[in-house]
Image: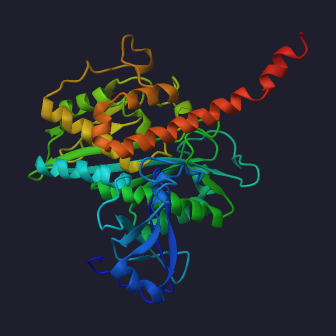
Amino acid sequence: MANGDYSLPEGTHTVILGLGDMNGIMRGKRIPATHWDSICQSGNALSVALFAIDMTCDVWDTPYVNFDNGYPDCHMMPMSKPASIPWEPGVAMCFARAEGMDHKEVPIDPRNVLKRQVERAANMGFEINVGTELEFYLLDPETNQPRDVGIDVYGLGRAAEMEHVIGPIRQQINEFGIPIEQSNPEYAAGQVEVNIRYDAPMVAADRVVMFRTLVKQLAALQGYRATFMAKPFFEQSGNGFHTHYSLWKDGKNILSDGGKLSGLGRNFIAGLQKRISEAALCGSATVNGFRRRQPYTFCPINTCWGMDNRTVAIRVIEGSEASTRVEKRDAGADCNPYLLLATDIAAGLDGIEQGLEPSEMTTGNAYEEEGAEPIPTDLETAISLARGSEWLKDVMGDLMHELYCQQSERELAFFNDYMTNRVTQHERDRYLGNF
């Protein structure tokens, strides 16, 4: 039974109840308000295969969900008071948690991976704040191409031209209850960045799941297709998911020492450096996700860290005592926020517990740092590192780790099969007229 105030806003006739799947895509049901009291008492049943499907909703036999056990149910349980959807009068949305038919946590729910690390931090006496930055493209739904041209990053003229769609995204999602700090045109035609205000890790991750689905809805209302795909166009900027971390104890930001990076901050960075490669799959789970990871793209290719430097993987932003923070820059906007935040936090806490020291700070172009430890730039390498990581298996749990690796292995196999069983235009251009 759900506990708390889940009363509906006046005039509500429909409630959207949903949660994040294995890829952080929000899935759920629309429920008549007349049935809401029953849902609050007993939850809403749906197949636990929700957590064992890929981004296309394809399903396969896994150790936890398979044809032998019949793909059984789990329950969605409301977690918050439903909030009105500003652009759908009478409709409210409520985020849910998953509960097995035995009333226990679902082992393959990625939300629980983050929950364990938040509890670990609390046991160490820490509170964590996370700010999230996500990039996405707004495209013509018929051509899947941007409607504007040029880069014009931060261009206020371009921002005004896009305000008919970005304005509602910024204003109405903020009104819904996800605090939006700012938006701006990004480094490609059709690309936008929106920043969500920092909060506790679980709140931040839940908001990312909701934000992505709400952006898609609002874009569609204005005749656009919004995509958080990591690299829609190889020659253009990719969509990143940057995370900003600060750690607090007894009301003090322990990553800061007078507005400068503290010793514990260095330990946190060292932990991130140590695990960034074996956890790379949690920031990019597809072949396309690793197409972002190219030199001179503002996406990192090694474990370098530095002060206010956008060529590194781990960027330190100093300032006031409260605002000093560590930004991790490798993940794609399509990744699962629970797994990304969980592995980041686990690595950083390890660094503090073990007193790790980071590499020498990069003060110039990290892409030219000789001897810098590389991070995976292809899916096959990322899978191999994830498969071989006992640390990652411990953080994710055996079942979640196995299922997530299986998904990426399938993605790689699909891609290789596609490339093997067709003749490309490149081959025709190069060979057809010369042999």
Q: Residue at x 82, y 16 (%)?
A: 430
Q: Residue at x 51, y 72 (%)?
A: 29
Q: Residue 246 occupies which quadrant of the picture?
A: top left
Residue at the extreme left:
250
Q: Residue at x 58, y 54 (%)?
A: 57
Tell me where residue 254 appears, x and y as whole percent: 14, 42
Task: State the residue in front, 117 or 270.
Answer: 117
Q: Residue 186 occupies which quadrant of the picture?
A: top right
Q: Residue at x 36, y 71 (%)?
A: 77
Q: Residue 383 occupies which quadrant of the picture?
A: top left
Tell me where residue 434 appears, x and y as whole percent: 89, 10
Which quarter of the image is occupied by the N terminus? bottom left
Residue 183, placed above or below residue 223 = above
Q: Is residue 379 left or right of residue 415?
A: left
Tell me where residue 337 appears, x and y as whole percent: 40, 49
Q: Is residue 38 visible?
A: yes
Residue at the extreme front:
68
Which quarter of the image is occupied by the C terminus? top right
Task: State the residue in front, 292 or 157.
Answer: 292
Tell me where residue 215 appears, x and y as whole percent: 54, 60
Q: Is residue 232 left or right of residue 46?
A: right
Q: Is residue 326 visible?
A: no
**Count of residue discs:** 0
